[in-house]
Amino acid sequence: MSTLVSDKKSVCVDAEEVGIRFGDTQVISDVSFSVKEGEIFVIMGPSGSGKSVLLRSVIGLLKPTSGRVLIGGLDASDRQTHEKIKTGLVFQAGALFNSMSVFDNLAFYPREHRLAKESDIREKVEQALEMLSLKEAANKIPAELSGGMKKRVAIARSLVMEPQLLLYDEPTSELDPTMAATISEVIGTLREELNVTSIVVSHDRDLAESISDRMILLKRGTIRASGTAKEVMGSDSEEIEEFFRPEIDVENPRFRR
Amino acid sequence: MWNRANKYLSDVGYHVVLLASALRYLPSLPRQMNRVGLYCFEMGYKTFPIVAILSFFIGAVLALQTGFALQQVGAESFIGSIVGLSLCRELAPVMTAFLLSGRVGSATTAELASMKVYQEIDALQTMNISPVRILVMPRLVAAFLITPPLTMFSIFIGWFGGMVVSKFVNFISLSPTIYWRGMMDFLTQDDVTDGLIKGQIFGLFVVLIACAQGLNTSGGPREIGFSVTRSVVISMIFILFTDYFITQALL
Ligand SMILES: Nc1ncnc2c1ncn2[C@@H]1O[C@H](COP(=O)(O)OP(=O)(O)O)[C@@H](O)[C@H]1O
Ligand SMILES: [Mg+2]
């Protein structure tokens, strides 16, 4: 683990009245939250509630239509912010480089930025692979991996970047319960040992309960509840059940081509 | 109508911006020579065989057509000059660019479009690695380097095809010596260089269009196919359209 430890401090994240619109659809409206240094912050919400879009605005892939997101006090939509503060995003579908082996996927960031000697990079990659029990997959290409393995590779690839802020988009979906437990353990370990600030998007209630310091519930792009997992989940179980009911209009389904 | 014109202009603008930002990353070229080498190899390897076959037959059929016309007035000795000139000034560069678009441009668009759709491009951005720097710039440089030899090769094979037909087709039966002398009397070095420059410009733009169409893809996997088609069609229109103006400029 030792070489995976970054010497940089973790950072805080502040979303200030963030609104995001695509054309005429308001996907996120008036979302504000703040994540403290080294905290694990969970964003929960049903499918289509705008969780991924919100994460994209934190990582700087998308500029909010209104409001702003600050990382360590700097504007997240500014590319330079992400050059000063190391941020990583574990994509929902992995977003692995399909033409490269798992090993090369992990080594890509340090190699491209010439961060270390090749032998040190290899060592660091080996460690990350070990941590997510991916040793035997090192020489496979992403197409040969199962959904759960891709997810772990995506996490390992972000680890190698030694981020100060790490965002996870549904890290445990598509995983079996054992692997999901491993992942939540990994998220915890990273915080313990590296003091990484983490934002975890999920609709897995167990995950939220086991790892979150604080959380918000998001529905149709607005915050419906916030607080610790106990406060949010314990409040009114019927309301929570209602909350997680999928948003499908059975009477009048619409299919988009 | 106005919308379409607007869309067209913004498309052109996108290509210009892409080219400009690729040029901005030229200083990172020394670090990326292995990528350039790889793309050169890919472009050459994929395109050489088909360029050879097509050039041979274009040269051959050109000799056949002109041979048939010229032998009626007893002017067969001009076959060499006609085949030689039209191949190097016009047919070889245009055909090489077409084949480059079909073989390399389409594959490039498909690759970049798939990287876009499956968020690999986004992943690069979150890693502070510019997609233009590592995906576009080395490809443009490779196209710049590989198209002149490719065009040259096409010219030679075409000339050779013309010679074979001139010699072995009964009603022409022109000796290779006369064929080559007819060609060399007429051709200047400029004719060849102009052809190579043309090929280079075409090749550069074929690859630029391919990259732009790939990176500009959005939506689902279906869009990958659309982008590939669009890339090849736009390239071909561009080649024939600019061919006229480049020719005029080089005359
Ligand atoms: N690039 C985009 N253009 C238009 N609409 C989008 C875009 N990205 C996401 N959306 C819409 O925003 C909404 C929220 O999407 P998303 O954040 O992916 O939901 P989830 O909470 O499941 O991650 C969806 O209705 C989706 O259709
Ligand atoms: Mg999502």
Image (cartoon, rainbow, N blue to C red):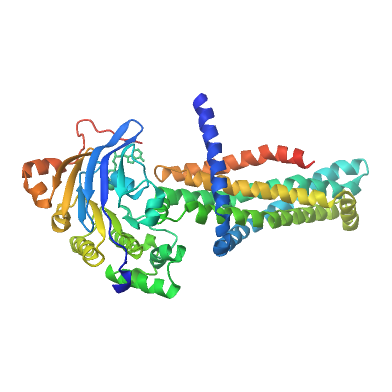
Q: Residue at x 81, y 50 (%)?
A: B190
Give the image quarter of residue B13.
top right
**Residue B115 in the figure: left or right of residue B62:** left
Residue nearest the observer in this picture, A83 or B60: A83
**Residue A195 in the figure: left or right of residue A57:** left
Picture mark count = 0
Q: Furthest-right residue in view?
A: B74
The x and y percentages for residue B112 are: 48, 50
Q: Which quadrant of the render holds ligand 1?
A: top left
Q: Please say whether residue B149 is visible from this viewpoint.
A: yes
Residue nearest the observer in this picture, B52 or B212: B212
The x and y percentages for residue B191 are: 80, 48
Q: Which quarter shows the C terminus of chain A? A: top left
Q: Which quarter shows the N terminus of chain A? A: bottom left
**Residue B26 in the figure: left or right of residue A40:** right
Residue nearest the observer in this picture, A187 or B42: A187
The x and y percentages for residue A55 are: 30, 48
In this rendering, the answer to whether A136 lies above or below A208 is below
In this rendering, the answer to whether B97 lies above or below A125 is above
Q: Please say whether residue A245 is visible from this viewpoint.
A: no
Give the image quarter of residue B180.
bottom right
Q: Furthest-front residue in view?
A: A73
